[in-house]
Amino acid sequence: MNFEIINTRRNNKIYTNGIDTYKVFNENYDKRLVFLESFITTEVEAAGVKVPSIKEVTFNDNHWCFKSDSIKGDTLFSLIKNDPDNVDKYLDKMVEVHTSIHKFKCPKLPIQKDKLTDYINLSDLDEGMKIDLLDMLNTCPKHKKLVHGNFTPHNILLSDNGDYILDWNHAAQGSASADVARTYIWMKTNMPEYADLYLTKFCDATNTSSKYVHNWIPIVAAARLGKKNPGEEDLLNSLISIIEY
């Protein structure tokens, strides 16, 4: 049986044989994270969100792997890149899918504020800045909406059977505005020409103050620093520097 590689990411590669899709994690990828992602994906699916259903979790040749049904369709990322004249329509679709997620609740998922706190503490920011950011975080309202944690055009698959949302390993219970702040940061890094437009569209669609979302951006950027991903430091530090006292 022939396998085609359809995506390569920092921690995994995605293959398909036309019937099933295989998410193969890098060698020595943390077993706990594999099963956490499997658990979260299953909980989100049970809540009613359209996700690729995990059928098997296997371990071969020092690689963990998820097996799920193959879903034929296009990611929003590929549609935007290949058809930029219609980017307005695609960003509207992205907002539609994003807001649909936030209508669900998954009470067994991790708490977003706890995750943000942990990653801010792991960052190399000075202690004074950490305290300021954690104080800001603690004063933010508590929400328990389902949030994706890495909602990007790569993770939205449009198919004849509906819109599927991929890669739930960062999902949690928390604030939709913090979730949008994370998407904004991703877009500033990868599709900067569309970042502000997406934020405007989301705020208009949800009647959310853009200032409220912007208040989350330094917090979420600081948490990203705690992940220590190469190449992000300059942008993240610039976003943290806009903190309002």
Image (spheres, helix red, strand yellow):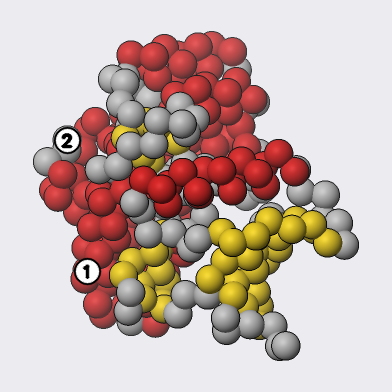
In the image as oriented, which residue stretches furthest toward the bottom? 2
Q: Residue at x 33, y 14 (%)?
A: 139
Q: For this rendering, which residue is in front, 74 or 189?
A: 74
Observer-nearest of 18 and 199? 18
> How far, Cα to Cα, is label 1 from label 2?
21 Å
Residue 16 in view in this figure: yes
Tag shown at residue 145:
none
> Callout 1: few (<14), some (14-19), or many (20+) C-alpha neighbours within 10 Å?
some
**Amino acid residing under circle 1:** Asp
Determine the image quadrant of residue 158. Answer: bottom left
State left or right for residue 78 relative to residue 237: left
- If the image is split into quadrants, where does the C terminus sit? top left
Secondary structure under the numbered disc 1 in the rendered image: helix
Residue appearing at x 25%, y 43% in the figure: 103
Residue lying farthest to the right in this orientation:
61
**Could you say where residue 12 lies in the image, as x and y percent from the top left?**
68, 60
- Residue marked by disc 1: 88
- Quarter of the figure that contains the N terminus: bottom right
Can you give x and y, in whole percent of width and height, for residue 11 in the image? Answer: 69, 55
Q: Which of 66 and 155 is in front in this view?
A: 66
Point 69% across, 83% down: residue: 3
Residue 159 at x, y percent in the picture: 36, 76
Name the residue tied to disc 2.
Answer: 209
Q: Looking at the image, is mark 1 or mark 2 earlier in the sequence?
A: 1
